Amino acid sequence: MMRLLFVHDNRFEHGADGHIYTSGTFPSALWERYLRHFDEVCVLARNGRNKGAAGAEIRADRARVFFQFAPNIGSLWGAAFNWRTSRARVRAAVAQANAVVARLPSELGFLAAAEAERQGKPLAVELAGCAWDAAINHGSPILKLYAPIFFHRTCRAAARAPLVVYVTSEFLQNRYPSSHHQISCSDVEIVPLSAEDRGRRGRRLERLARGGLPQLGTIASLSPFYKGLHLAIEAIAQLRAEGLHYPYAILGPGNPEPWRALARSAGVEDLVRFDGTREPGAPVRGWLDDIDLHLQPSLAEGLPRATIEAMSRGVACIGSDVGGIPELLPRAQLHPSGDSRSLAETIRRLATAPDLVASAAWSGVEQARLFWPEMLERCHDEAYGRLRAMAEARSGGCGR
């Protein structure tokens, strides 16, 4: 029996029905990439809360996947009072596993990576974002002070891990280099655009060509400041001042009230809509099929799954120039990070030129082919097949 331990700071929710729920980042289908190579997966994450009526609706648990929880150590209070308890739980979980995946940057992930090295357990680090950019742009003065330490810990973990899986092709590799085996592989889940879907997108593009108003949208969590939703709302307000009244929809978990207040103060509350969450797969694809321009105005990113999903549905995309976004979009569809005026200008240039929207839409569909399931399965299998082989070599060719 080969057991994989997966460690991250994600906060799951406990349902009254006994199941574990997520806001969307770690749906039950995600664990399949690990279960193809390991008999079971143990997920170690932050203590979650009980799921309320308005809580997450997406199941995270499934057969052969088990959950353990540790106290939060991602704050000053948590680090001061919970660190020993969390370290003990990480240490015990690593001891019971044949191999470890530490998803970084995350505090529990750092503990797991160090503990796997101490116990001599095969380790893969998944580098899913930039520690420096996330901390500097979080909005908290304390996190800004912590940014150099966060950056150093991520650099050290990537440099020491025997296997690193990067979600970008270049950006994270250059910022957090590995001296060991490394694999580039996004963790997005998309499906190829069918002929029926192409027809539907074509009809939306024809509507724009006839003078229809473009629908703008963003898929993002409402919690992190660094997703740049404030910049999008500011850009919508600037465009309204010019007489361009573009509706903007946001899909993602979190409390919308602070963002509604911002939209109200900017004079665009009637243009900004919050659509909550959708189940991964068809419901999210259906939402994207009603969007004409997807905005990714992030202050920090790895490789944004939302942008790739939007591209795969024929949605023209605009993004900031941070992280791996320039690996996805041409220069004409990028704006300087943190600059709402430049974002507004980029939106205006595309939204007022239906031919540019159509060109960006179909180019995005072709670019998204790089992330079709068979392509990603190949690199996932390379990564976790290698980790399984490392675990077998350590245990003498058989499970525990």
Image (cartoon, rainbow, N blue to C red):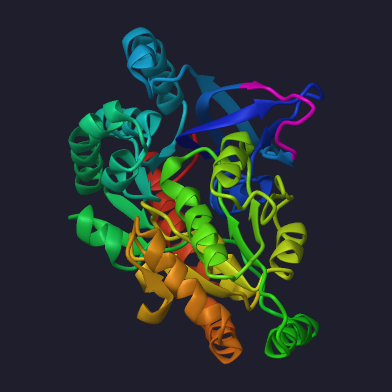
> What residue is shown at x 72% (from left), y 81% (from top)?
212
Query: Can you see residue 253?
Result: yes
Q: In the image, residue 194 lies at what x, y percent?
A: 74, 82
> What residue is shown at x 76% (from left), y 31% (from top)?
54
Q: 99 above or below 351?
A: above
Q: In the image, residue 144 lies at what x, y percent?
A: 25, 34
**In this rendering, would 306 be left or right of 344?**
right
Q: In the image, residue 171 lies at what x, y percent?
A: 28, 63
Asked whether 204 or 395 is in front, the reply is 204
Q: 257 above or below 360?
A: above
Q: 70 above or below 12?
A: above
**In this rendering, would 123 be left or right of 380?**
left
**In this rendering, would 105 be left or right of 178?**
right
Asked if the magenta segment contains residue 331, the reply would be no
Q: Which range is magenta?
A: 49-57
The chief SS type of the magenta part is loop
> What residue is shown at x 33% (from left), y 43% (from top)?
137
